Image: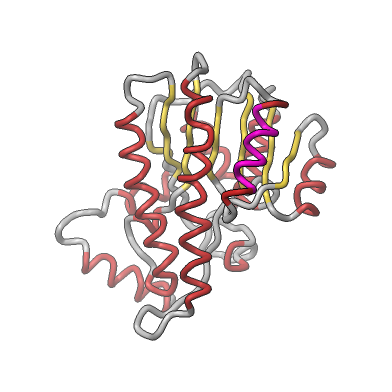
Amino acid sequence: MHLTGNTILITGGGSGIGRALAEALHRLDNQVIIAGRRLGHLEATLAANPGMRAIQLDVDDPRSIETATATLLAEHPRLNVLINNAGIMQIDHLGEALDDALLVSTVTTNLLGPIRMTSALIEHLKRQEQATVINVSSVLAFVPLAVAGVYCATKAAIHSYTQSLRYRLKDSSVQVMEIAPPWVQTDLLNSNDEPRAMPLAPFIEQTMAALATADEEVLVDIAKPLRNNVGPNETPFITQFNDLFLNPQ
């Protein structure tokens, strides 16, 4: 991916990984548009980054996506990068009856949201000389964390969707990439001060370096062993991973 001279939309760009990515790309002379539901987060990010733009967008709502897309393309006709970053993570217990609201909100935000956003913009992106779609999944797509089983399932689905999208666009001008973060110190699950999570700054530094390569999957060093675990004998590793998370001592 070319890291300069782009017009970039980042969903969930008002906080966490989304904001940090937005700021890193903004510093590289890209026109960055952050999108999200929480107006206060968007305004705070804009105040700290003069020249960045924002649009309110609820990726759970197809009508909001339709309205935002029309506004974006009218105001930013050179839009050529979509980063599907918006997501939620909620604790669940798959061994018990699930709260349906948790199930629906997680699947809608994490899976339907990126698919709908990409669908809304894909014809425009294909008309650009160079374009990129970046989907943010998680290493938990490959090594699921049982205390957030629905979240992990949506991220595994995003990985699968990304592979299919990449195949369909292989003869187009659109590059398809996937960022699979490890546990990062953000607001997600109140992890800002979690010592087991990767600090945000080095995560962004390594991610930006990887984005500049030809790699289709963007992985920081700490994420690579988890990404490489997938295989027919993965269950023992997954069991150990969950045991260590639940009983870190």
Q: Give the percent coordinates (x, y) of residue 245.
A: 42, 72
The residue that appears at 35% across and 72% down in the rendered structure is 242
Vertical side of 32 occupied by 203: above or below: below
Closer to the camera, 117 or 187? 117
Task: Identify the residue at the far left of this view.
Answer: 232
Q: Is residue 138 left or right of residue 185?
A: left
Q: Quadrant of residue 9?
A: top right
Q: Is residue 58 left or right of residue 203?
A: right
Magenta segment, principal secondary structure?
helix
Q: Give the percent coordinates (x, y) of residue 17.
A: 60, 48
Residue 116 seen: yes
Q: Give the percent coordinates (x, y) of residue 126.
A: 46, 22
Q: Is residue 149 left or right of residue 4?
A: left
Q: Is residue 106 magenta?
A: no
Vertical side of 13 occupied by 230: above or below: below
Q: Which residues are magenta?
A: 64-73
Task: Identify the residue at the far bottom of this view.
Answer: 96
Closer to the camera, 127 or 94? 127
Vertical side of 209 occupied by 89: above or below: below
Q: Quadrant of residue 161?
A: top left
Q: Is residue 65 magenta?
A: yes
Closer to the camera, 212 or 127? 127
The residue that appears at 80% across and 29% down in the rendered structure is 51
Q: Give the percent coordinates (x, y) of residue 49.
A: 79, 36
Residue 249 seen: no
